Image (tube, rainbow, N blue to C red):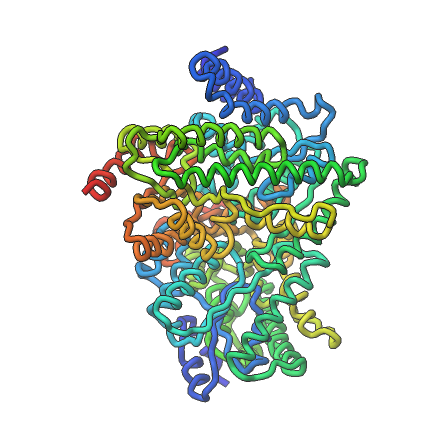
Amino acid sequence: MADVKDLEELVLKGEMSITEFACTKIDGSLERMRQKHPEMLWTMEIQKFMWDNYRDAHKNGKKLVFYGGSIPTELIAAFDCFGFYMDVIPFRLSTNPAITAKYIDEAEKYVAPTMCGLDKTELGAWLSGAYGIKPDMFVYNTVPCDSSRLAYPAMAKLMDVPTFSFDTPFRRDDRGAEYLAEQIEDFIVFMEENTGHKLDWDKLKYFMENSNRNFELQKKCSDLRKNKPCPLPGRLLVLNGTTNAVACYPEMGDLYAAELEAGQMMVELGIGACPDEKYRVAMLQNMIWGAASIMDWMQTEYNAVAIMDAFGFQGDIMYEHMDDRRDCFKTMGKKMQNNPMIHGASGPSEYHLALVDKIFQDYDPNVSMFLGHVGCKHTWASAKMVSDMVQEKYGLPTLYLDLDAIDGRYKSNDEIKAQISEYFETVVMK
Amino acid sequence: MDYQRLFESDISTEAVKAWKAKGKKAVGIICCHVPEELFYAADILPVRMRATNCIDNSEAQAWMSSFSCSFARGLLQYWLEGPYKELDGFVTSDGCMQSSRMHDNAAYINTIKKTGKFIRQIDAPRKISERAYPFYRAELQDLVTDLEELTGNKITDEKLKAAIAKLNEARELVAKVYELRKEKDPVISGTDCLKLTLAATNMPVDEYVELLKAFLADAKNRKPITDHRVRLMVIGSGLDDPKYIELIESKGGFVVADSLCFGRRGFDDPMEVDDKDVLGSIAKYYLDRLVCPRMMDKHFEMDDYIIDTCRDWNVDGILYQRMQYCEIWGGEAVYFQDRLKNAGIPILTVEREEQMTNEGQLGIRVEAFVEMIEKED
């Protein structure tokens, strides 16, 4: 396989699409993993499943539904379509800062530089004609943030394909769930019109069952992290993000099953992700998508493992009455409102506070970090409330550190590490 | 009647103090989906909150961080240590994430300090649909209940209709003021017009209506303003500082129209009332009216409004000011840039903070823009 730098060059010249780039890069990683760490293959296989299906959807006779925000993916799958979660682009490209920089610059011709790097990358890549795949439909909703509220309708305009949008209420209550359940009925009409198929309830049930299995396994994996030492590395928290893209497919459950098996084995052996766990780090905002290696570095350098983040991947909303259409759609509505990231970042700050409080109650961290993605301005505006609560209830000072989880130009990994080091050495270890 | 109070744009607490001296409540309003009608119907003075002249927002910044828009920080600052300490509370919608976080921090501090202030947030849909109206109406019904509880006053349909009538009168009169600006040499500058619309936040609507009537009666006696080089429209983030417009006008850019929530858009056309469902009429009006690009399915309507206004007010160019960290307005160019270009309307984009900064640079850019448009003429 060609060197990543060569592939990057092709993408920058516009000679390779980002989809092809992602697929090729993943194949290369799998190849290396087979040789060096075959026991960890499961961490990459989900990526292959996703990106190959994006690339080959049309070849496989499936319509491709691009979506932004929190969407009932079970329905997309039940209509025999494959959903393309647009945030996978910035997530996947975040380790290639030259590429994200190109697309971010392209987007900034139109939008303010302060807009979130995820949305700028998605928008800029589309404006550059770089996706390499074309949507048949586009679906978005009105969360999680002002950046995406601007970007999604703009993308709809640019894509010029049949589009559906959900209006997701800000507060999470029964009124909101009912409102979303009604809109889901409208969405089904949209899907029926644009696929030519009627909704097949048995298919939907299959995907809802998958979804339940995945979230149950996800919960069990999260629960494993309560153990001391924490058996799972911080890096795997980053992988949780994949759930938003393929939550209703069995492959996601297979990943969690493998993670659970590995974690349980570690627990039984009394081994932690760190050889000698000293610090259990709670991440109060997002994960560092573009620099997951910092998690590994914290483990080796400070015996500090990230045990949980406030992205919110501890799914606990399940479909219960699978033959009750209204109940299922209300549950979908609740899932949309409580989706990871949505849960921590959107809506009133009280949800973010409650989530962080639960992390401290359940996982017993002794280090608190707010590694704040600068695009998440609304979480920055909750930061003091959250960190004050942590200080008052749990007696821990919080490290505030601004970074751009997508745009590597904002702050280098070395600078991030230096700031984390300073915190450990001047505060935590004192 | 002396109408000079229309041009006193600094935040005044006189009306709030006078209102409260009568044993009544005064409550702040943030953003464009909190209907003032409900407050008047409960005999509460609604005060649209703003951050004019908030030069130091350091306490608010400690809460909201420097990554928040300075308008929202200014609101929090004035709530914590400023003119809005006088208020009995405030109500906001989820207009944007910044105003929402202003609410969240204020509510959090309220709880910690046990101030007992009345703080509420209502959920306003971001899309117009037959499903959205009843949802929003239900939110307003909850607010009605809360306001009744706060004051002990029952909000009846008759009281709501009286409030609608009075606010409609203000809407019609402000529209007439804007009509004056269609003239070749208008009798009111853009600076004074913004002061005039901001004045609505400083007094009860009854007083405001009387002052507007007096101004309009006297308009024919005012001297037309002739020393301008180009006619501009100002669009963008919430702008509550007339000094900003004053600077633009000092460089030859005469502001004749706007698409600002503190300007024309905050008033809009009069509300139509269905007697069978007065609260439903209010919900429909506030959801339908176009104030802010927070509404996700109204971007093109917003562009249409801007282009139509340019035509009707004979605008030579647009000044698009976007507050730093205001995503709602910050990327609107994605929608209108090509359309404005096709319509032959020049546009100048400038970044802004709540407090006046970089005046020299702004002046130079406006001057250059004015020259460019003049040359094109």
A31 to B91, vertically: above or below: above
**Is residue B373 something that shows in the picture?**
no
Residue A289 placement, left or right of A66: left
A286 to B211, vertically: above or below: above
Q: Where is residue A242 in the image (x, y as percent from the top left)?
A: 53, 33
Residue at the extreme left:
A430
- Quadrant of res B78: bottom left
Residue drawn 45% across the image and 13% down it: A3
Residue drawn 52% across the image and 51% down it: B328
Q: How many labels does the image show?
A: 0
- Quadrant of res B63: bottom left
Q: Position of residue A347 (x, y in %)?
A: 51, 54
Residue A370 placement, left or right of B337: left
Residue at the extreme front:
A268
Which residue is nearer to you in this view: A186 or A37? A37
Residue A394 placement, left or right of A63: left
Q: Position of residue A261 (x, y in %)?
A: 49, 29
Quarter holding the C terminus of chain A is top left
Which residue is nearer to you in this view: B211 or B216? B211
Residue drawn 71% across the image and 22% down it: A60
Which residue is nearer to you in this view: B259 or A239? A239
**Is residue A177 something that shows in the picture?**
yes
Which residue is nearer to you in this view: B267 or A36? A36
Q: Position of residue A425 (x, y in %)?
A: 21, 38
